[in-house]
Amino acid sequence: LTPHEAAALVVNGTMVALGGWTFYNTPMTVVRAAIRAGVRDIHLVSSPGAIGPELLIAAGCVKRLSTPFLTMEQFGLAPAFRRAVEHGSLEVRETDGPALAASLRAAADDLPYGLIHDLGTDLPSVCPEYYQVFEDPLHSGVRLYAVPALKADVALIHAQRGDCFGNLQYLGATFFDQLLARSARTVIATVDELVATDVLQQSPHLTKVPGFLVDAVVPAERAAYPCGSHGLYPPDLVHLERYARMASTEQGAADYLAQSVYAADEVSVRDGWAGRPR
Amino acid sequence: VTTFGSAQTDSYAISELLAVTLARELKAEEVGILGTRSEIAYAACRLAQLTHAPGLWCVSGPSGVVNPRTNAILPIADDGLFPGAEAVLELTDNLDLIDWNQGCWDFAVLGGLQVDRFGNLNTVVIGDWQRPKLRGPGAIGATVLAAQANHVFIVMTDHTPRSFRPVVDFISAIGFGRTGVERERLALSGSGPRLLLSPLGVFDFAPDSHEMRVRSLHPGQTLSEVQERTGFTLLASSAAPRQTEPPTRVELELLRTCVDVTAVLRDASAVPL
């Protein structure tokens, strides 16, 4: 599919899961396409993220957010996320690592909830509907919470290589992507390279997500840009720092979106920043 | 860059001091897990492996890379850590060890926007959760590592009354809880924070009350100044606490030539959370 066609599968008001990890393997090409398509009111279930969830929040696509971590790493706190939460315009489902993992596993296993240990934090007290005290029928004496399954309508993930059957090869870490692919109803993957199946057949152990779990492949050169793609290219730190700086004001975030998402085609996004010729 | 000492060979950045101090605490055969923003912790693990603890295990939570051996400090999720490492675990498998298993990790290294006198950490919000003054990055896996890793090292890159609070605004990673004795009530498997390293000193937690106390102050710091920059009363055994042992020439040399060739630790802007 084209990024535009893929974005049409992201429906207003649905649950959308995002893969990768902070500055790595975020399916940015489809994130930008979804923003251009004007997606609204999604429940974003995000892997620990950076500019991916940031842009969706800045563009007003997100109604509710479930993520364990959202940061611009060495460039500071995530500015659009900060602003939205501090202004009360974003509903946050406070999610730690175990809760996300248990919720996704429960969805992948078609169970209504997953179990996690009581870790003595304040998360259950601010989100009691998400962290339910578990009355253990086996009376193990272990303090547990049940967290409801998060079955995303669409998962957006990124792999380095894929073929026309949806087989996805990872040349580095997979992060939460395999769990997202197993748990979501529809799985859309951006790939940096669309290759023939016989290329994948030379190294089938790199195919970490088999094609039968994938509904659509969106090939695009440097599809994770400005994030890096493990094994292929590093994140563009100049771009990411510039975003973090611009987005520290609402106007700056709007300017960034105007220049680098709405008014831009994908080639100019990748090539236009910092005057870098390809 | 904050440096101490007169000649260049004797001077070191505060992050280098913290990395060396943490390295000395790490033991061979221990298994450690590192998360995001772990520059000091990664340097400490590498330095320990190159000196007294070659058998130390160092695992990246995000990417699953085991024992990276780079001579430069990279973000812990970066694939630049893969060449020369011993394994890359799939996160979807490693989740069992990170999020549920109670015996795997000997230590974790954690930080936060706020810490309190019982070593509770906050990376979620400053102010009220419903309408925060400042929204932080979130709780991530620190919730479970704080509860279940055998012991926890805390590295705070800011030591001010703003970050060292009597009580944190939100407990995202438990130290000893709001009363100081919560871990027993909750039957947590880990033993809690062992040490806290800040730009001003090294702190531990009293055996019974679990209140933070001064173990050593970094060269040039006085107890009264450190107390003034701490939002609660620190326990101290004497008016003139020990001084943190500065890095030896050998440690500094190893750190700069084999661990941190790109001088991340000397670039002060690279360290804050």
Image (tube, rainbow, N blue to C red):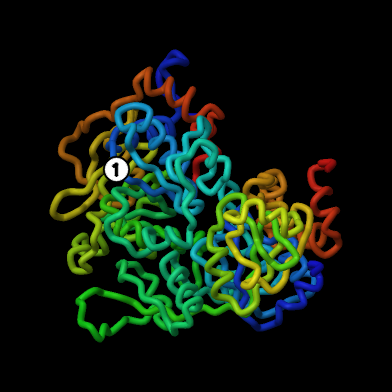
Q: Residues within 10 Å of mark 1 (few under 14, many from 20)?
A: some
Q: For this rendering, which residue is in front, B95 or A199?
A: A199
Which is more toward the observer, A2 or B6? A2
Image position, residue A116 (x, y; %): 35, 72
Horizontal side, residue A101 vs residue B209: left or right: right
Q: Residue at x 38, y 28 (%)?
A: B50
Estimate the x, y position of residue B89 in percent, counting from the top left.
47, 52
**What is the secondary structure assignment of the residue under circle 1?**
loop
Q: Is residue B21 visible?
A: no
Give me the chain letter of mark 1. Answer: B
Q: Position of residue A254 (x, y in %)?
A: 76, 63
Picture mark count: 1
In the rendered structure, which amino acid carries the disc numbered 1? Glu
Measuring 51% from the left and 33% from the top, which residue is drawn there? B70
Q: Tell me where residue A32 sits by quadrant.
A: bottom right
Residue projecting furthest to the left: B208
| Residue B26 figure quarter | top left
Q: Is residue A249 above or below residue A105?
A: above
The quadrant in which the C terminus of chain A is found is top right
Q: Is residue B112 above or below residue B125?
A: above
Name the residue that disc number 1 marks: B30
